[in-house]
Amino acid sequence: MAMLTDEMLLESYQMATKLQLDRDFIALLLAEIHKRDLNTDTGSILH
């Protein structure tokens, strides 16, 4: 996921949760967000 900018990653996460995409995909995005120490509203379907 190194090719995604931080902004694109956060937007992808927000859209994935909004569209209720696959939980594993959302978890993958969230793991990368945490790896990059980015801030987001993590009150998603995973929590």
Image (spheres, grey):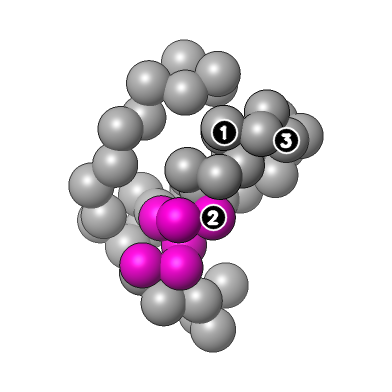
* Residue 43 image position (x, y, % from top left): 38, 21
Give the residue furthest to the bottom.
3
**Type of amino acid at the residue the image marks with label 3:** Leu
On screen, residue 14 versus residue 36, left or right, reads: right
Name the residue rendered at 23%, 47% in the picture: 39
**Type of amino acid at the residue the image marks with label 1:** Thr
Give the residue furthest to the right.
22
Which label sits on residue 12? 2
Name the residue tied to disc 1: 17
Name the residue tied to disc 3: 21
* Residue 32 shows in the view: no
Are the residues flagged by discs 3 and 1 in contact, CB closer than 8 Å?
yes
- How far apart are the two marked residues, 2 and 3, measured between alpha carbons? 11 Å
Q: Which residues are magenta?
A: 7-12
Q: Main secondary structure of the magenta part?
A: helix
Label 2 packing within 10 angstroms: few (<14), some (14-19), many (20+): some
Q: Quadrant of residue 11?
A: bottom left
Disc with the residue nearer the chain's start (2 vs 3): 2
